[in-house]
């Protein structure tokens, strides 16, 4: 393989987005992935509105093209189930018409969505995309370039700048970036596919269940095309070890015994194995760059600590990584000091949200407060609408952090 200025390690949403933005700016790059696409990735498969706006930046026609694909379902909102079992329906838009409006979110198996992006990658001659190419080892040469080696220790390439987008288990992020797994900032997740789950929302609302005995963990049920559903559980790794939770057993037990779920799963069929994977959370600000490299997506620990959303954050970091790679090339400056601009750009966009989600994650430690908000919202359309708008409006979300929000709720205002 050729030596290159820019090499991207990993072709998930982070790496693919970076490659596409680089191509649009006229830069060539080498994109490596150990998998052959289409490939699966353990995930909840929910694509938020932020994914759509990142797609739009890659090509104005892409959101409509995705919406026209049979690989996805449009989703119109979220059904939260509070610890007391109360359902709080939160549409993504306060008023919507599925017949005429475009949905603010989608659900699509990663097998298909990631391949949707890879099809764009394959169209671009500027991107030298090599699948089935595992990078097992890296070393930095005295002149700052990176040398990458395969499992047989054969050299793959040498590159001036490395965009590291190889996901939650990135050894580069651990060894070079210093991102150790911290149980307080890391979540364990399990996912299984089902067919025939009863009682899914007619407008494909995604379901988040906060079950009292399972807190601070949560369970999700996300509808998929062809009558399938993505069902899974997530819990802070710290809580899993402290409480010695066996996630697989708990998932089965909840689906078989929980009063609101057991009937709905009584005749459902599990498709394939239950698979687990880690979620490195962005609840702590970590360095995202160093001499000659940038960390993207899960390799940069950028997952939302409340919702578990990481696809859009990988795409946001991919966009900024492409921008800073272009700047580094133009200035011929690959130093740690110069590349710090990438960290600033990513956190300028994401830090406020990540901080708010960290605060909401803490709410899970106060089930009574959660119940209280859900009870009030059930009888108060204005509050339900406010919560709905919180998904779009950060200033509104900021209110959740303020005691005055709860005082007003208590007073019924
Ligand atoms: C259980 C679970 C549920 C989730 N639910 C959601 C959800 O509903 N919505 C959401 O937005 N996010 C969700 N996430 C988070 C989301 O899956 C990730 O944030 C997202 O995949 C990050 O994208 P990425 O491009 O950084 O990494 P990845 O998608 O992990 O891509 C990394 C790529 O690197 C390749 N690679 C890895 N190592 C090497 C190597 N050594 N050599 C070559 N290639 C390599 C892999 O093959 C892979 O293609 C969930 C995560 C989990 C675990």
Image: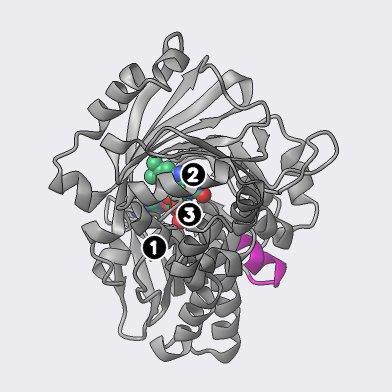
Where disc 2 sits, the SS reads helix
Residue nearer the viewer, 336 or 354: 354
Quickly name the residue at label 3.
310
Is 403 situated above or below 72?
below
Q: Residue furthest top?
A: 267
Q: Which secondary structure class fits the magenta region best?
A: helix
Label for residue 358? 1
Give residue 218's quadrant in the image: top left
Dot placed on the residue nearer the N-terminal end, 1 or 3 = 3
Query: Image check: 290 left or right of 399?
Result: left
Mark 2 vs mark 3: which is more N-terminal? 3
Question: Taking 326 as reference, is 242 left or right?
Answer: left
Circle 2 or circle 3, nearest the eye: 2
Classify residue 280 by image quadrant. Answer: bottom left
Q: Cα distance, mark 1 to mark 3? A: 14 Å
Residue 383 at what x, y percent from top left?
61, 52
On the image, the x and y values in percent for residue 292 come to: 41, 79
Place residue 53 in its image quadrant.
bottom right
| Stretch in magenta | 19-27
Q: Is residue 144 visible?
A: yes
Task: Give the residue number, with chain letter if any, for mark 2.
Answer: 374
């Amino acid at each position: 393989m050729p030596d290159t200025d820019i090499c991207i390690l990993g072709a998930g949403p982070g790496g693919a987005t970076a490659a596409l933005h680089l191509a649009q700016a006229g830069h060539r790059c080498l994109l490596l992935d150990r998998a052959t696409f289409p490939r699966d990735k353990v995930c909840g498969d929910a694509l938020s509105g932020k994914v759509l706006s990142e797609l739009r930046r890659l090509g104005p026609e892409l959101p409509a093209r995705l919406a026209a694909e049979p690989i996805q379902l449009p989703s119109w909102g979220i059904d939260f189930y509070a610890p007391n079992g109360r359902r709080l329906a939160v549409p993504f838009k306060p008023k919507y018409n599925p017949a005429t409006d475009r949905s603010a979110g989608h659900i699509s198996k990663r097998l298909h969505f990631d391949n949707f992006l890879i099809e764009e990658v394959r169209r671009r001659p500027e991107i030298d995309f090599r699948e089935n190419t595992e990078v097992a080892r890296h070393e930095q040469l005295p002149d700052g370039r990176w040398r990458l080696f395969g499992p047989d220790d054969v050299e793959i390439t040498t590159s001036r700048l490395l965009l590291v987008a190889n996901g939650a288990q990135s050894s580069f992020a651990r060894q070079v970036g210093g991102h150790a797994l911290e149980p307080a900032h890391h979540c364990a997740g399990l996912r299984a596919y089902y067919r025939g789950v009863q009682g899914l929302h007619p407008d494909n609302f995604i379901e988040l269940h906060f079950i009292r005995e399972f807190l601070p963990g949560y369970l999700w049920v996300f509808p998929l095309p062809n009558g399938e559903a993505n069902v899974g559980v997530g819990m802070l790794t710290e809580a899993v070890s402290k409480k010695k939770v066996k996630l697989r057993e708990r998932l089965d037990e909840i689906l078989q015994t929980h009063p609101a779920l057991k009937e709905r799963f009584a005749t459902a069929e599990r498709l394939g194995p239950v698979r687990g994977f880690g979620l490195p959370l962005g609840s702590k600000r970590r360095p995202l760059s160093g001499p000659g490299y940038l960390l993207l997506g899960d390799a940069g620990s950028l997952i939302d600590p409340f919702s578990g959303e990481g696809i859009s954050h990988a795409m946001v970091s991919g966009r900024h990584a492409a921008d800073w790679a272009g700047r580094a090339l133009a200035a011929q400056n690959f130093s740690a000091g110069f590349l710090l601009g990438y960290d600033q750009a990513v956190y300028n966009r994401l830090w406020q949200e990540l901080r708010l989600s960290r605060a909401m994650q803490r709410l899970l430690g106060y089930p009574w407060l959660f119940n209280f908000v859900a009870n009030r919202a059930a009888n108060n359309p204005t509050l339900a609408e406010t919560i709905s708008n919180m998904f779009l409006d950060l200033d509104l979300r900021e209110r959740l952090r303020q005691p005055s929000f709860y005082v007003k709720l208590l007073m019924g205002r």
